[in-house]
Image (tube, helix red, strand yellow):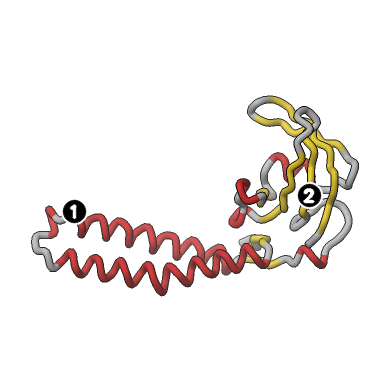
Amino acid sequence: MDKIPMTRAGFTALDDELKTLKTVERPAVIRSIAEAREHGDLSENAEYHAAREKQSFIEGRIKELEAILSLAEVIDPAKLSGSIKFGATVTILDEETEEERTYQIVGEAEADIEAGLLNIKSPLARALIGKDEGDSIEVKTPGGERGYEVVSVRFV
């Protein structure tokens, strides 16, 4: 399988989530299941079914995180330079609204647009890759094409 690029911060966050699921959440749900079993008839025991459902979610997330982390290729953006690429922190200017936004281009598993972490596979990130400060880009969005200017590129 292909490696999954991610920053050190993204790797650490996913690893911390995995540890929490294994050491806190999993034991807690096992206790909940045991307590619910003590209440008797499992066929009509809502607590038991809810706990089993939560256990299923936790186990699924653990498997997902283990798979992602096993394929992770941690990239240190501070060691990079040049035009925009994975790990770059980019400030762009919306040419229509004159609004500046700053994003770091990160891997799919760590992307969070609200936190300024832009998925490398997103249309905006794909349009930014290879560009430099001062370049303009056009991005197709559901609301039509948007124009942006690259204000700054940093690797931190």
Residue type of the residue flagged with mark 1:
Ala
The quadrant in which residue 127 appears is top right
Q: Residue at x 42, y 71 (%)?
A: 22
Residue type of the residue flagged with mark 2:
Val
Depth order, front residue of 10/151: 151
Q: Secondary structure beneath disc 1?
A: helix
Which numbered disc covers residue 46? 1
Query: Which sits earlier in the primary sequence, circle 1 or circle 2?
Result: 1
Q: Secondary structure beneath disc 2?
A: strand
Left or right: 94, with 41 as reference point = right
Left or right: 149, with 38 as reference point = right
Q: Residue furthest left?
A: 41
The quadrant in which residue 134 appears is top right
Is the residue under label 2 in contact with that under label 1 (CB below 8 Å)? Answer: no
Left or right: 154, with 117 as reference point = right
Relative image position of residue 7 (x, y in whole percent): 68, 63
Above or below, 24 against 87 in this view is: below
Quadrant including the C terminus: bottom right
Q: Residues within 10 Å of mark 1 (few under 14, many from 20)?
A: few
Above or below, 142 against 135 in this view is: above
Q: Residue furthest bottom?
A: 23
Depth order, front residue of 137/148: 148
Q: Residue at x 66, y 61 (%)?
A: 6
Which numbered disc covers residue 90? 2
Relative image position of residue 46 (x, y in whole percent): 18, 53
Quadrant including the N terminus: bottom right
Relative image position of residue 37 (x, y in whole percent): 16, 66
Give the Cα distance between marks 1 and 2. Answer: 49 Å
Left or right: 8, with 100 as reference point = left
